[in-house]
Image (cartoon, helix red, strand yellow):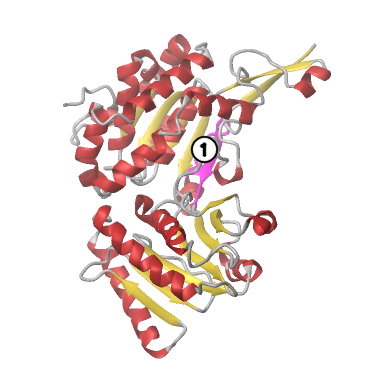
């Protein structure tokens, strides 16, 4: 199957992208939005998006097959990782979840269609309608597709023209999604553009920024700061910067009988997208005083990661990344030889996975690619004190605890600043309507018109 040239990212690599071409593309998107999208009912958009997601879950769907055929070479993820990631994302894009997202973020499902009232507004004889930006520019980062797919879906729901700028070599999965949308609804897809070019071409970015009412960006904190500096005064900027995640295993949540299930869930969080997402755990804190020690948990986790490698191998990595993993392994090999408080387990003849146990609770950033720490702590308070260096940057904590303590632990994590707490095994599989970085996804995009009656 050869993709037609519907989007700029479909052009051959040697094609030249100029500022005038991008300005004209943006203006065309706005005209198409006014004609095909601006007054489209939410019910229709929900039906279309859910239909596209259902297509992607079918094994014989051509765009899914293209993603699985070309994706490993284009993204570095293995076939198993891509298959699991695609299924995990699109299973959530259902009519019920899309409707729930509208109700959760906007108060009423028809907020984008007409003035409506919540019970509180009705008592005050008020109504309100939400309006999306005329045009959104998305600056995507890396090969992980979920954030870009989600941004595109949100842009459709708020009826915005969208320009998606991908990093060089990273447009395959976003543009396959765009093509799948075009196949089901060409007029809707005519309000969407996907392009890619190398970073640093500020003239091209400035050209599309000048046309935008809202700019979203994902990347390092340094990248976001550079983009924020160039956002026009009229445009809203939403940046999603560097975030880390970790797991916490309470002493009342782990038993010998439940250990296999617990390490399977922990390994699932490490293996998903090869640990490269903001929701991937860098380490697991294991609380002292339970029937299973942190060292035992680490050893069983290593066995589970070895088993997962046989079923769903890690993708290819650059030579320099493999060298960094080997260097860090060597460091802990020396420590383990001289300290009973350090142990390590790792895949033989490869850098596919690594588990480091340390009694020292200090938070340690992993080099990712299935390299994970297990650390021993007295309690959650000690874990959070040890993680103070990343306070304000923690996206998700995977929690395993007894029912009697969960609420108490969640409140401690919330007060410390964690945006999301979930069970182990679901760190990289958030619900569709989760609040990314603690913010409402749709509500951050819209503006409101209040109607006082």
Q: Position of residue 385 (x, y in %)?
A: 63, 70
Dot 1: element = loop
Residue 409 appears in view? no
In-front residue for pair 28/364? 364
Q: Picture quarter containing residue 191?
A: top left
Left or right of 436? Residue 345 is left
Q: Position of residue 291 (x, y in %)?
A: 54, 72
Q: Position of residue 324 (x, y in %)?
A: 31, 69
Left or right of 349? Residue 211 is right
Q: Is residue 447 above or below residue 367?
A: above
Tag count in the figure?
1
Q: Position of residue 200 (x, y in %)?
A: 36, 46
In-front residue for pair 262/421? 262
Residue 294 appears in view? yes
Left or right of 316? Residue 333 is right
Q: Residue most toward the front?
A: 257
Residue at the image position 49 percent from the left and 53 percent from the top: 242
Question: Is residue 127 within the magenta segment?
Answer: no
Q: Quadrant of the C terminus?
A: top right
Left or right of 273? Residue 279 is right
Q: Residue most toward the left?
A: 1
Please give the residue where the numbered disc 1 appears in the rendered image.
231
Residue at the image position 50 percent from the left and 20 percent from the top: 159
Question: Is residue 236 within the magenta segment?
Answer: yes
Q: Picture quarter containing residue 144?
A: top left
Residue at the image position 61 percent from the left and 54 percent from the top: 418
**In this picture, which residue range is highlighted in magenta?**
227-241
Label 1, residues with CA under 10 Å away: few <14, some 14-19, many ≥20: some
Q: Residue most toward the right?
A: 124
Q: Quadrant of the N terminus?
A: top left
């Amino acid at each position: 199957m050869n993709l037609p040239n519907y989007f700029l990212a479909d052009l051959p690599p040697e094609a030249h992208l100029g500022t005038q071409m991008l300005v004209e593309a943006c203006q065309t998107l706005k005209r198409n939005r006014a004609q095909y999208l601006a007054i489209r009912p939410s019910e229709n958009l929900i039906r279309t998006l859910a239909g596209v997601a259902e297509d992607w879950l079918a094994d014989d769907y051509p765009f899914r097959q293209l993603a699985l055929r070309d994706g490993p070479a284009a993204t570095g993820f293995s076939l198993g990782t891509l298959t699991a990631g695609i299924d995990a994302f699109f299973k959530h894009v259902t009519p019920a979840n899309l409707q729930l997202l509208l109700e959760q973020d906007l108060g009423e499902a028809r907020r984008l269609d007409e003035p409506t009232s919540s019970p509180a507004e009705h008592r005050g004889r008020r109504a309100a309608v939400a309006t999306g930006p005329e045009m959104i520019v998305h600056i995507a980062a890396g090969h992980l597709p979920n954030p870009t797919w989600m941004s595109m879906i949100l842009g459709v729901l708020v009826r915005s023209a969208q320009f998606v700028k991908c990093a060089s070599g990273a447009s395959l999965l976003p543009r396959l999604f765009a093509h799948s949308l075009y196949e089901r609804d060409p007029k809707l897809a005519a309000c969407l553009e996907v392009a890619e070019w190398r970073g640093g071409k500020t003239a091209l970015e400035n050209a599309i920024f000048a046309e935008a009412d809202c700019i979203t960006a994902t990347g390092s904190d340094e990248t976001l700061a550079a983009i924020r500096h160039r956002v026009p005064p009229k445009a809203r900027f939403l940046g999603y910067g560097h975030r880390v995640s970790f797991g916490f295993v309470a002493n009342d949540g782990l038993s010998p009988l439940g250990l296999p299930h617990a390490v399977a869930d922990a390994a699932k969080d490490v293996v998903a997208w090869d640990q490269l997402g903001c929701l991937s755990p860098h380490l697991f804190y294991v609380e002292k005083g339970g029937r299973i020690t942190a060292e035992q948990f680490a050893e069983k986790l290593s066995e589970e990661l070895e088993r997962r490698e046989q079923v769903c191998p890690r993708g290819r990595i650059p030579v320099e990344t493999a060298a960094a993993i080997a260097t860090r392994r060597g460091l802990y090999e020396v420590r383990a030889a001289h300290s009973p408080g350090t142990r390590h387990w790792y895949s033989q003849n490869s850098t596919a996975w690594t588990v480091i146990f340390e009694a020292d609770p200090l938070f340690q950033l992993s080099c990712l690619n299935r390299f994970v720490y297990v650390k021993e702590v007295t309690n959650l308070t000690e874990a959070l004190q040890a993680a103070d260096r990343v306070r304000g940057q923690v996206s998700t904590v995977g929690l395993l605890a007894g029912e009697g303590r969960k609420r108490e632990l969640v409140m401690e994590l919330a007060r410390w600043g964690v945006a999301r707490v979930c069970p182990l095994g679901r760190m990289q599989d958030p619900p569709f309507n989760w609040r990314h970085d603690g913010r409402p996804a749709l509500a951050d995009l819209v503006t409101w018109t209040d109607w006082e009656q």
